[in-house]
Amino acid sequence: MSGVDAIVDVEVGRVGMDAPASRIGDDAPRPDGVPKVTGDFAFSSDLWHDRMLWGGTLRSPHPSAVIRHLDVGPALALAGVYAALTHEDVPGSSTYGLERADQPVLADGVVRYEGEPVAIVAADHPATARRALDAIVVEYEPIEALVNSELAEASEPIHPDGNVFRRIHLRHGDQTVVGRSDLVSVEGIYEVGMQDQAFLGPESGMAVPDGDGGVDLHVATQWLHADRDQVAACLGLPSDRVRLSLAGVGGAFGAREDLSLHVHLCLLALRTGRPVKMSYSREESFHGHVHRHPARMWYRHYANSVGDLVRVEAHLLFDGGAYASTSSAVLANATCFSTGPYRVPSAEVEGVAVRTNNPPCGAMRGFGAVQTCFAHEAQMDLLADALGMDPVALRRRNALATGDVLITGQRVTGSLPVVEVLDACAGHPSAAVRPEEPMARPGGAGRTADADHVVRGEAVALGFKNLMFSEGFDDSSEARCEIRDGVVTITSACAEVGQGFVTLVRQIVGEVLGTSEVVLEPASTVGIGSAGSTSASRQTWMSGGAVQLACEAARSDLLTRIAGDYEVPADDLSLVDGQVTGLPDGYSPSLTEATGEPVVASVVHRHAPTVPLDSDGQGDAHVSFAVSAHRAIVDVDPDLGLVRVVELTTAQDVGRILNPRQAVGQLEGGAAQGVGLAVMEEVQVEGGRIRNASFTDYLIPTALDMPPVEIAALVEQPEPGAPFGAKGIGESPTISSTPAVVGAIRSATGLALPRVPVRPEDIALADRDPVKSSPEVAA
Amino acid sequence: MTATIARTLDEACAALADRPHAVVLAGGTDLMVEANRGGRDMEDVVVVDRIPELRGWAQHGGSLRIGACTTCAEIGDGELASLVPALAQAARTVGSPQIRNAATIGGNLGTASPAGDTLPVLAALDAEVEVRSASASRMLPLHDFVIGPKATALEPGELIAAVHLPVTDGPQEFLKVGVRNAMVISVASLALVVDRPGRNVRIALGSVGPVPIRAVEAEVLAAERIDWSGNGILDSEVVERVCELVADAARPIDDHRGTIAYRRHAVDVLARRSLRRALASEEERNGL
């Protein structure tokens, strides 16, 4: 029984055959763009099989409890219920995790966060599955939840692995420099709330048993092979018995890096012998994936009187929630980039990521750099104020450049156009006018503000982050290029989650092989090695690079073969616009004629190696870096505390633009997530419980909240070692947009606003005689 | 489960007589959200959105009858919007365009959410709800109809047929505070109706109590102090006191959308702004 043929064909990768060859730099359209707009694209929630059962998950209502009694018998007794499983039914590893396997597949005697899976069922209908979940008997004995991250270290361990996921104590440069008396210092405590990735397509997938003890899992994810290895370990199966295929992904942003329903689906399918589908509701989705780490950050910046940064001290506390997920790597990023794209000769940064009974946190666009950027940019503005300097001038004076050394001791060898990005953004003319239309004022459709209730502010911020995986991780991507009868078939396990790999493949093939006859095989774990994760701004570099190298290898093999057939030097031959040129007598076979006998080339692409951080947080731990700038102009209604972002201007370090349309899309979408964090997006957690697990109450920006994004410049300084010189661009827009918006609100109101998202009461009920800030200014 | 698609009001009433605890479905913008969350058992459903008698509106002298299935989009635009501008403004703040095309005023009443956007306007206008059943018809003043958070005086077998409200001569305002600039549940809202011939002022608050709240003391003071026969304005010192009384009338709670302190503060601000728009002198209205 395969069953796979009955599943809705999710054609994420098929590329049109009749379009002209796209090249690098073209505005090539997304092959899945029109289907997504018209509703024809099959997302993972559209998976269907005529014999399928529906899975459901029973989740803990308590953030912390001991399970005294668990009985699935009453669920199994219901008609239409085919399986009800608990931790006792997990045949392999009982836990999983990206960095360490500390998270139970199903709770074993204890639950550590609200929403933790306790039992799973498979039934003939979603309503039957819900009734089955209701029928399961669980007796919880709630225990006091550890929800304050500041108390985590000193509290009793809530997990056998302890309450500290990682501590990094970074020390760089002369640690005695602050004894000098001529320094100006500013100090602040900053806080970032828990943001959600808020993808539109909730977790969903389908597992199909192969009848031979193995299973096929169709799922929306960011990294098929890492999922497969974790799933296989939990199922107690060799990894070749578990095959994952990418189902249509409705957004990811980091929330699909961790397993969610993967193991559950496979357990149910293997138990029942039937295909099983699960699709989380929106509310369940908020409990079903990790969020961005809430952070508390103390900073002190020291500068000399002319504005050269001398030293930065910081303490970063990241709340990782109940399980590890990617907390260690998030913390490393937060720590390594804690001081922003500035020359900081002396630094001491202590980063700690802790375990609590709050919802688990992990990857989200920006990955640790978002939190610290909010803090270091607020500090730069405070420092400029204390020094009486223009904030842009202060940033320019301290801007990193190629050849400079980071606080990790690593020297920047690639491109890093910080000054160029800053100047382009800050110097871009503003088109912002005072709106006549009341709906365009803060408060929007509620028509709360009249013109004289509105004050305007403006600020610029810079963001800084690494590209690719770091700290010695063996990061690779495999791609295969087969050319047969003129058709180029590319195989890669790269997960298309909206970033545009499916477009880029066509452009790369067009550039290298000069043809539009391209088929991108659906991404799966079968017959191809890992592409790595679609995260860390890495897929264009890693999988794009693998495709480029595979195409070049196939071209080289083809030309060598033809050269041998015609007894001419291979160097004389080339492939131009789909024709082989350089043969004697002007004979110029087409690619179709030349590949009646196919050529195939496979390549595993790796970036330059990195090393782990040492005990002082020093080392060449990162591959490449990117910088972005945002300028925000906001209107604020101080009496009601309502905000309208009027204009958002950006410039970004992109290496080289491969597809301008897609690049702009990344810059716009990323900035929208940054605006959301600045003024509205927060998973509100009280006592370990999420209070707003819905899109009614977890607010993301609408068209009235998000202004058009003005692109001041896409700064193209090709990155050595990157395919076509292109840097990953997906994360930067989310990093610097938040501090720019909040800086602008500060400039409009004079308030310190040390926390995001900024809530209306933070402005409206703030001290009515605010001072610009209360920095500790030492003379 | 049964679903009855009624084509006439009599059919709907008959279906409800048959199954008195059936859920009435109109635009579905509240009900389907609840159903999808699994928070509402729907054994029987009576669908009323295809009943012509429940759609549209009519004016009889100084009174309007708006059918229960009139949508927020219809209320927010056109001639009806010019007759009851505050109701139109409230309707325009409901959800997104797609939601306003489906959501009905009867549904807003039936859900009776403390944050229901049209409810403060209906409260300020002393609207009456026309309730039908197979055997009877009755009119309920709004404050007797909405009896608690998400609770109405509807009896089993009854449905909302229409809402009746007066056309007034004078300024009307509706202001709503939300954390987002559109498509947001209100944190606080305020409706102001100035009835010049009747020489009275009505102020009603939303999202700051279990039901829409009339700020009666504020209304009385404002009505007393407006120079009705002269320039028709309210002095700024009196405005201060009226706003205090408005804030005092609020009975807000702390929840995930806002705090008690902020909500009380917000209705104070909204009162000041609405009074300025409606009743300030030319000079004071310069900033508008």
Image: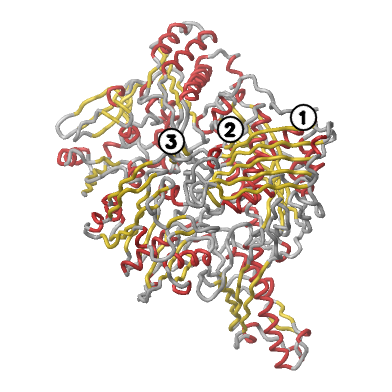
Does dot 3 land on a helix, a strand or a loop?
Answer: loop
Q: Are marks 1 and 3 on the same chain?
A: no
Q: Which mark is residue B94?
A: 3
Q: Nearer the viewer, mark 1 or mark 3?
A: 1
Amino acid at circle 1: Ala
Q: In this rendering, does residue B197 appear at all?
A: no
Q: Quadrant of the N terminus of chain A?
A: bottom left
Please, which chain is the residue tagged with disc 3 on? Answer: B
Amino acid at circle 3: Val
Coordinates of residue A273 in the picture (x, y in percent):
32, 70
Q: Is residue B286 above or below residue B177?
A: above
Q: Which residue is mark 1?
A: A386
Coordinates of residue B9 in the picture (x, y in percent):
22, 38
Q: Nearer the viewer, residue A156 or A579?
A: A156
Q: Which mark is residue A643?
A: 2
Decide if residue B162 is on the left or right side of residue B230: left
* Labels 1 and 3 touching (C-beta < 8 A): no
